[in-house]
Image: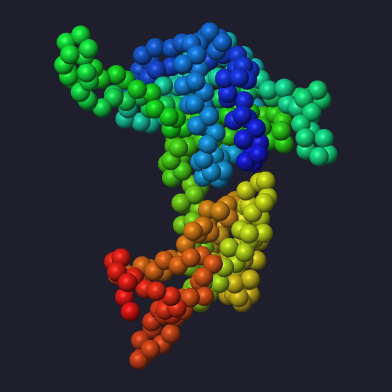
Amino acid sequence: MNKKEIAEIKKLLLPTKETITRIAGCYVSAEKEKITTFSQSFGLLEEEAVFKYLEIFRKSLSGTVGKNLLDMEFPNEEEAEGGKQQFLYRLRQSHLEDEDLLNQFYDKVIEGYVTPENYLILLIANAYDVPGRGTDQIEMYDASEEVYDYFQAVICPVDLAKPALSYDRETTSFRSRERDWIVGMPAVGILFPSFTGRGNDIHSCLYYSKNPEDLHFEFTDALLGCQSPLSAGLQKEAFDLVVEQSLGEKCDFETVKEIHEALQERKEEHEDDPDPDSLGLGDVRIILSKAGVAEDALEGLEAAYEENIGKDSTILASNVSAKAKFEVHTPDVTITVSPDRTDLVETRLIDGRKCIVIPITDEVMVNGIHVR
């Protein structure tokens, strides 16, 4: 799913839409025991509760595509009878009205989700009459050809409120406030099926993780059976290793600076694309070539790519290109430069020593003090 498709579904999670049919949940202890479960019509909720639940589910559609929000495709074996995709499909078809399926879902989550705290599993069922669009991309609500039938599931941490003093009107005094169990914003969530091409895509789901560096692989394996992608940080590390291993001794300062500029150029070229820009082996080869790396220096690229990323796997350009800075590190010094001014930094041999040189063209401040 791209940003526009996610935003379109997120707009459904408003009190005025009234398309959500059912909500269900299970409160689980840190010891993996079910404390309580519930299932009811969403329309019977109190108004204040509706606002809080919608806020929670909107949060699971927030963040950066490719970091917090990931498309997960089901392998063929999970779409066969008894597979994990088939189970999610049955749950979706039930519109969350089958208590047995709901309890099976809770059990699968409890089995795979690892956390030291209490948590709340929440699900909603929704149906969206997808409006058609004309050639001018204006929505035509009387030209709907498909109903997007889906459910969302989230896992929210439940923590004790912080101890505090509160004012007691009856005794006109301040007392220690009773600590309640508070439901937090979701740590993870899924949307099934995906809303790809503005329609039902039962072969994939959208996965949300609040922490892009902790994707809860054990949970996705247990519930989804999908191949877990590299996190954004691991994609950056893998790309860096590919460059270092394939270039070897030729991985010098000027070459890495040129690679940075080639990545920035590609980022600008794809800035208006609706879908995230993915890099495969061929794309990385083109980027290195644009950076001036000779063809004979790329002999080890394929092996390095296969070892660190995977032969047929891709990474996102946004995860490997520095968005806001160009950094140079030594054990004792860090230099940060605007990404479009890498020309300010160069290496020179001065008095027999290799140095990083930055020309002074504007005012200079040291610890907030202007120096001459």
Does residue 212 show up?
yes
- Colouring mode (rainbow / by chain / secondary structure / one colour): rainbow
| Closer to the camera in the image, 366 or 134 | 366
| Closer to the camera in the image, 5 or 316 | 5
Does residue 82 show up?
no
Quadrant in the rendering for residue 61: top right
Q: Residue at x 72, y 22 (%)?
A: 129
| Closer to the camera in the image, 7 or 219 | 7
Q: Is residue 247 above or below residue 80?
A: below
Percent coordinates x, y for residue 101 in the rendering: 54, 14
Percent coordinates x, y for residue 232 in the rendering: 49, 49
The C terminus, quarter of image:
bottom left
How many marks the image carries: the answer is 0
Q: Is residue 196 above or below residue 28?
A: below
Percent coordinates x, y for residue 28 in the rendering: 37, 19
Q: Residue at x 68, y 50 (%)?
A: 273
Q: Residue at x 58, y 25 (%)?
A: 13
Q: Is residue 312 above or below residue 157?
A: below
Q: Residue at x 63, y 71 (%)?
A: 290
Tell me if 326 is positioned left or right of 89 in this view: left
| Closer to the camera in the image, 9 or 73 | 9
Q: Is residue 72 above or below residue 144?
A: below
The N terminus, quarter of image:
top right
Percent coordinates x, y for residue 185 in the rendering: 43, 29
